Amino acid sequence: MTDSGTHKKNLNHQGSQSANAKPKAKNGHKRPISGNKPAQAVQASQQAGSRKAKSPRELAMDTLVKVAQTGAYSNLQLNRTLQDAGLQRADAGLVTELVYGTIQRQATLDYWLGRFVSKGLNKLEPWVHQLLRMSAYQLLYLDRIPAHAAVNEAVTIAKKRGHSGISGMVNGVLRSIDRGRDELQASAIKHADPIVQIALRHSYPEWLVSRWVSAYGADQAERICAAGNAHPHSSVRVNSLKGSREDAIALLMEAGYDAKPSAVAPAGIAVERGGNLADTAGFRDGLWSVQDESSMLVAEVVAPKAGMQVLDCCAAPGGKSTHLAELMEGKGKVWANDLHAHKRDLIVTQSERLKLRNVEAITEDALKLADRFKPNSMDAVLLDAPCSGFGVIKRKPEIKWTKTLGDVSDIAAVQHRLLNAVCDLVRPGGVLVYSTCTIERDENEKQIADFLQAHSEFELDPGWPEPILDQLRKAGVIDEHFEGQAQLLPQHFDSDGFYIARMIKRS
Ligand SMILES: C[S@@+](CC[C@H](N)C(=O)[O-])C[C@H]1O[C@@H](n2cnc3c(N)ncnc32)[C@H](O)[C@@H]1O
């Protein structure tokens, strides 16, 4: 059983704003840094200098407070912070590491902090609580930040923001954590209840662990939790209309990326090292798109043919619509629909960048698509439904703290309505593919079982492309009983957790 919490990350940072201080995960991957624009950076840091700029740690602390208090997505809030501050790359990397890592590990951090904060963590001011979490994260999870740097910087922030009692308390608590470092390992947390133990070791809410233990067993549940704390690697999908995967790999390697063919997606390339993939010539020229490898399987499972009419009901920002259009060799039509008018532009921008002429972006509530299109008019319909998102926790760690059991049943009810609203658009003999980026059975297998029970005109279809089935079998995702639906867990390919069901409408 993996416990990434027992290994400290190798972070080369001396606590100052050093240029070579690039945070690294324990496996050598860097977290993607967004909002890092050198020209703006220089200008903004000059402006910031005259305003008494905040240190990277103070910026990280403020970001954590905002995410916790406003429910903002961590990636969006972090982008805003980085763009406003205009940090050098190394400092931006430190802020990124501290924000994601602290949110990821907050339950484990609170478990240990609770021992040393005598008045109780819930009595702390929000900024003090986040400062302690963030500093304990450095002490317990980041190898190359010297303890004195983590503690001193925390005390400096506490002095700047609070009274002397607070800075004294921060100093005392962090020094106690530092002294006990060898004992305060996630793997040292023992509890008679395996659910509580997994939840505390890997930092997840108990209700979520409990559901995963029921659905997948304790061993797999613990692997899911560990995988959700790993650094995500990047990946791109090659535009098959513009070149081969081999050519794209060669271009990426030339540009300094460590690129290799995806273990699961035929058009995918896994990228281990390098900068922002959306900031490459190949991306701008439409040679590739940035997409998770599990997500790339969805259009492959739809397996559309050139000339078909295909409807993507929930399409923005257009990752799967554009993939469908590529697989159709630019012929036929992909109707790329989304509820939100402002998201239509995202689909148009991607289609134009990829030079795809067979994507038509439309704006409609998918519940009303039956008013716009005739029954039996589509060769294939894709419902990539809104979902709880538990498959993408490693990219959006706050999901584990913000989503509730009530959210799961609410979104499952929406998915049920969406499936019922769009299924009549599939022609007899046509295909309906349902997918989510979650690992919740109520939104996946159970959703589809209920749908098939109510719609005897549909049946699951195991006729997926053989190269994909082969990889899924090798990874243990499916077995000889495969019927046409698969649940990828985040540990299977180190990619997102995804559910895909392919159904055929009987002729
Ligand atoms: C999982 S995301 C889709 C991702 C997209 N398929 C891709 O691969 O880029 C779900 C999308 O569903 C849209 N959505 C939510 N409710 C909807 C509805 N009732 N009708 C249409 N779209 C909806 C959201 O705006 C969101 O963009």
Image (cartoon, rainbow, N blue to C red):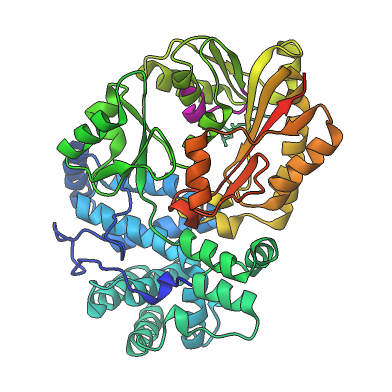
Residue 80 in the image: above or below residue 316: below
Ligand 1 occupies quarter: top right
Side (left or right) of 250 relative to 170? left
Residue 472 in the image: above or below residue 268: below
Residue 456 image point, x, y percent: 84, 31
Q: Residue at x 33, y 90 (%)?
A: 179
Residue 313 image point, x, y percent: 63, 25
Side (left or right) of 471 relative to 419? left
Question: Over which residues does the magenta segment extend?
Answer: 312-322
Observer-nearest residue: 391 or 203?
391
Residue 95 image point, x, y percent: 31, 57
Question: Residue 183, can we see it?
Answer: yes
Observer-nearest residue: 269 or 38?
269
Residue 57 in magenta stretch:
no
Residue 280 image point, x, y percent: 24, 32
So how many labels did they put on this image? 0
Q: Residue at x 53, y 32 (%)?
A: 465
Side (left or right) of 273 relative to 60? left
Residue 314 in magenta stretch:
yes
Observer-nearest residue: 478 or 49?
478
Question: Residue 365, can we see it?
Answer: no
Quadrant assignment for the C terminus: top right
The quadrant in which residue 178 appears is: bottom left
Observer-nearest residue: 476 or 443?
476
